Amino acid sequence: MASSFSTFNAIRPFNLNTPSHENASISSFKTSLPFLGSTQELRPNLLTCKSPSASSSCRQSSIVAVSDVVKEKKVKSSSSSPNLLITKQEGLVLYEDMVLGRSFEDMCAQMYYRGKMFGFVHLYNGQEAVSTGFIKLLKQEDSVVSTYRDHVHALSKGVPARAVMSELFGKKTGCCRGQGGSMHMFSKEHNVLGGFAFIGEGIPVATGAAFTSKYNREVLKQADCDHVTMAFFGDGTCNNGQFFECLNMAALWKLPIIFVVENNLWAIGMSHLRATSDPEIWKKGPAFGMPGIHVDGMDVLKVREVALEAVARARRGDGPTLVECETYRFRGHSLADPDELRDAAEKAHYANRDPITALKKYMIENKLVEETELKAIDKKIDEMLEDAVEFAEASPFPDRSQLLENVFADPKGFGIAPDGSYRCEDPKFTQGTAHV
């Protein structure tokens, strides 16, 4: 089967010894996804340049909506069959996961303002199509690395709502036993390798996980090890050094990793278009010899079609893919952000493109589901979250003795005395005469 990423050759300056299935003709594909940008005032040179002298600053390149490409293929191969991108079961899985993510974050906001959560809490509202479209294609053995906006990534990977909510409450039953909090979700069981508070620091971890998969398969001869890794990060990360270093390493060693840029157009209060010389992040992929693609991150079906091919490439050993998902967060940067910097018209524009509403409309119009089935899912999620909150509130806080666990290789040999007491509480400790 020809690759949906054939279009990448249009932006590759020379042959990079890509597999033959990536060398298909691109002449039949049309540009259908312009880079939307964030504000009209900042966009004129990017989208309206017409003179030849200005072409270099415009830096326009062809972008293909992969879902449209797949539609064309399906129409040609079977004109009598319905032109649907998903089955009913697939649609229900996507819908339930997105509703879970949205409703969970709304519940987090309620609990935060009631004083049940502390510190900074960054919500994912509006970006659900990205997490669902990518992560629901993974196996349990595959790995996910996230950012500080990580609750929904963990949920999509299968971490129970109880465990995530309890972690946000700082309780012992949380997925990190209450020691991680909002920005540091981790689950060894589900191969969620962590949320990372500092931008870019998760990308090297994800690259290392992908290297592990390749090493196990090629050096240790574990033939069934086709595990892939997904690294999620935002547009603000893409001017950081770790991003470029890891793109280079992943391409050099053909690592099974997908770099997923969740470009919500704002890095806290900085517009993406003001912070980078070329706002089209996807073009950085071909610079390192890997496919780069831009997709509408508000459309879960388009995201899913891109993810299907990116995951397939990684599993069959064809190397990494860089995917820029243009999306939008419906809330401020964090719950402490009054969200006064973004234009009201811009926020309204993206609110009208709600990915959950769009999927619901698609499934009903194509008679994949009845509205009563979706309402049953909504009710199921509401009950699940009520249970998660009750479970978190009833759970105990971590024991004090847990404080130094997972901090030092031998917690009993540094901060805790053999009898379990803290050395710092021994008067001799501060005098420098305590036995260590």
Image: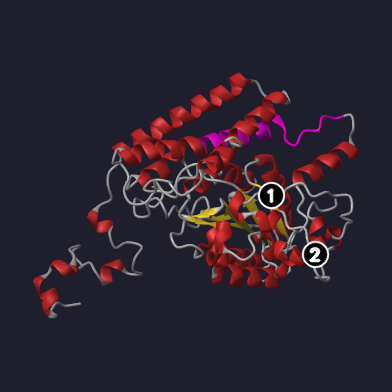
Q: Which residue is mark 1?
A: 295
**Does residue 351 appear anywhere in the picture?**
yes
Mark 2 packing: few (<14 Cα in 10 Å), some, or many (20+)? few
Q: Position of residue 8 (x, y in %)?
A: 78, 60
Q: Which residue is mark 2?
A: 52
The residue drawn where x is 67% and y is 31% is: 89
Q: Is residue 253 above or below residue 359?
A: below
Farthest residue, direction left:
427
Q: Quadrant of residue 108?
A: top left
Q: How are the residues colored?
A: secondary structure
Q: Is residue 387 above or below residue 243?
A: above
Q: Quadrant of residue 436?
A: bottom left
The residue drawn where x is 84% and y is 39% is: 74
The residue drawn where x is 67% and y is 62% is: 256
Residue 66 or residue 374, whichever sits in front:
66
Marks 2 and 1, the one that precedes in the sequence: 2
Farthest residue, direction bottom:
433
The kind of residue on which mark 1 rests is Val
The residue drawn where x is 71% and y is 56% is: 293
Label 2: which secondary element: helix
Q: Position of residue 210 (x, y in %)?
A: 61, 64
Asked whether 378 falls inside the magenta stretch, the response is no
Asked whether 97 falls inside the magenta stretch, the response is yes
Asked whether, in this view, residue 371 is left or right of residue 125, the answer is right
Which residues are drawn in magenta? 81-100
Mark 1 packing: few (<14 Cα in 10 Å), some, or many (20+)? many
Residue 91 or residue 279, whichever sits in front:
279
Q: CA distance from mark 2 to mark 1?
A: 27 Å
Label 1: which secondary element: strand
Q: Position of residue 148 (x, y in %)?
A: 45, 54
**Prevailing SS of the magenta stretch:** helix
Number of numbered labels in the structure image: 2
